[in-house]
Image (spheres, helix red, strand yellow):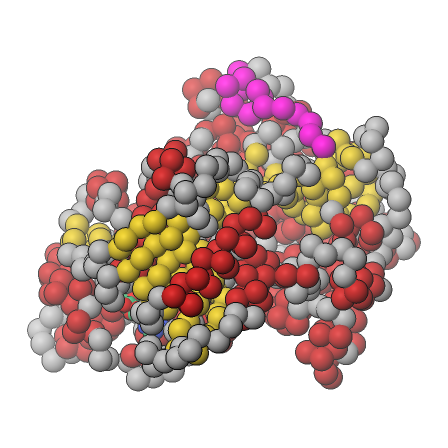
Amino acid sequence: MKEEGSLPISGAKDEILGLLRKHEVVVVVGDTGSGKTTQLPAYLLEADEASSSSSERLLFCPVAITQPRRVAATSVSARVAHTLGTRVGSEMVGYKVRFDARVAARTRLTFMTDGVLVRECVSDPGLRKYRTIMLDEAHERSVETDVLFGLVKQALRSRGGGLRCVVSSATLNAEQFSTYFSCPVVRVPGRAYPVDVYHSKKRQTMTRFGPSSRDYVEAAVEVASRIHSTQPAGHVLVFLTGQDEIEKACGLLRELQEHDSLELRVLPLYGALPPDDANRVFEEVDDSSVRKIVVATNIAETSLTVPGIKYVVDSGYAKLKGFEPSRSVASLTVVPVSKVAAEQRAGRAGRTGPGQCYRLYSKACFDDMAPETIPEIKRTSMASVALVLKSLRVADVVAFDFLDPPDPAQLACALLELHALGALDEGPRLTHLGYAMANLALEPNLARALLETRLSYPEARDPVLSICAMLSAEEVWYFPGRRRRRRDDEQHLEILAAHLKFRHPRGDLFSLIRVYDAFEKNSADAPAWARRHWLRYRALHFARRARRQLRDELAALDIPKSSSSSSSSSSSSNYHLPEDEQIARSMCAGLCLNAAERGLHPEAFVLLPSPSLAAETDGLSTGVGALPSISLVRVDEVTSAAFAKHPPAICFHELRVTHSSRGSFAHNVLVVDPPDIIHDYRRRIGKADLDDLCGRPRKKII
Ligand code: ADP
Ligand code: MG
């Protein structure tokens, strides 16, 4: 472990371990790169090994270390295994992420996504498998980490001293954590070199979706190439917002002229990247003869530290999950980052020596940025959270001990949604169906769709499994980034033609089944087959694994056939419905809250109101009720080509907001004809009393 001694955290090791012996919870704050993630777990392991020879009986292992991101969990476990001289999946180090795990029977350090630990809590609320929980990257404030704060607090209480918790964060405002747990804070002194920050001189404004992504991708490439041709050795880190942009920028950068003495290595880094590709970013190179240009999402802001970065190029944007309570739809939106995030990004350049940060926005734009990023729990659908809490038998979800209580109106909205999906009764207790939904590694709506096949449409099970698995994977339709805009490009036409072979008149969800089935049929040479059809092999490969896990989870569930929550139309008469019809209805059962009907304009749809709006809304006027009830949905390029003209109604998996003024469009669409099918599944909307669902008069919560 050659660098251990030089990492700032090593100076605080004894203090941290000492405090952990006396206190159940310790907060550790230290700059990104100070060694929290990679060293702290190793210290706990070491302490255990030392304790066998001393009188100290307190053991820290097994340890669960949570990461808000998949890639972080897998790549950090690889790093730690490497420094400990072992391999991932050994007794020493492993990882667990959704649909993938590499652990031994009694792995002592398990890196996992926070979502995985939340789900483990469902079956084991005391987290008895572990002696220590490390809630890492707490500053990121992902919803799951936020929920874990409350769950771990409960677990600590129930374990009566047998559980320890380390909360580690890269930002200084740790008071909130230490107040919440009434625990001590260890501050690891930072060690950063000065970074010169340059702003763009252009006058511009940063809006939610603009300047158009094309502008900042091209500007980023230009600045990175200027650095490469004029500046001395040192790696470059470029911040963009998502996979497509990153692949496009990488394509353009790879065409750069060779620098006299420096070999150029262009590397993408984003969430959906498979572990091996992500680890290439960390490969050791001779810094004086090779220059890496890493093009990353905000994953490189704090959770992964790429060594040797000297230059940072910051677009000023990030893709964040958003949620519009008025429509109950989640969306991914490109938004300007906060000041704290911009400073973190700049800080990446000063880890190993003085650095430079080039901001693609003006100083005035920086001054306009929000001081901090709003925690995800304040801008996400609460339905999954509420479902998990309910399955953990938290009676009063609104009163749950959140670190930062979410908007009660959103929680109320989530309860209405769960009720509409049949997961909650008026009690409000979780129904059998609700328990089953909580036990599937899917969002509540997809879980509901999958369960509908168990309740009413058994023949639809396999295809619906395929849809759910494909929707859990990254986008399968592959377009090499930089060609995307050139509609008349020959290759573009070739790709469209390849994709259109899978098109299905009932929409994208059916196209996904076709793709998946074709993939299975061609499994002998699947990677080559996928390449020929311009499909992402990675997505298909992931979907196969996800599908297998979902199938097992579904089989293990015990749900009575005659659940009162099933569709009224479910009866033995369903069995003679054609398979396609059964699939469409099952998907409708889950996606009925994301639905739209044809409007006056041939390509525009009018969203159907969400449960919260359909419920009587008086008293909610400051919450969800005041928001607009309808909006236009426009169908995306692939989608619109994929179904017959003008279906009367659609359900969709996701609403996406574009960078340009094209507005929102529905992504992954299902054609529904006749629309009554949707209305049938929506019949529970508005039937529940919000006071009952919240377990208290709503005036008090909103
Ligand atoms: P923190 O969690 O405090 O942000 P980390 O433990 O992630 O810090 O990183 C500590 C140091 O280890 C950093 O200097 C980083 O460059 C280095 N490091 C982390 N992961 C790797 C890796 N996969 N390969 C090489 N160095 C790494
Ligand atoms: Mg870290």
Q: Is residue 31 or residue 403 the one in the foreground?
A: 31
Q: Is 280 within the magenta?
A: no
207 vs 277: above or below? above
Q: Quadrant of residue 553?
A: bottom right
Residue extending furthest toward the top? 618
Left or right of 105 in this view: 327: right
* Residue at the (27%, 48%) spot, across then down: 171
* Residue at the (78%, 38%) spot, across then down: 678
The magenta segment is 619-632
**Residue 318 percent across, percent down from the top left:** 47, 48
493 vs 341: above or below? below
Left or right of 684 in this view: 117: left
**Residue 600 percent across, percent down from the top left:** 84, 28
Q: Quadrant of residue 503?
A: bottom right
24 vs 340: above or below? below
Q: Is residue 302 or residue 403 the one in the foreground?
A: 302
Count up the numbered dots: 0
Left or right of 101 in this view: 499: right
Q: Quadrant of residue 178?
A: top left
* Residue at the (42%, 35%) spot, across then down: 406
**Majority SS type along the magenta span:** loop
* Residue at the (23%, 80%) spot, across then down: 1
Left or right of 373 in this view: 165: left
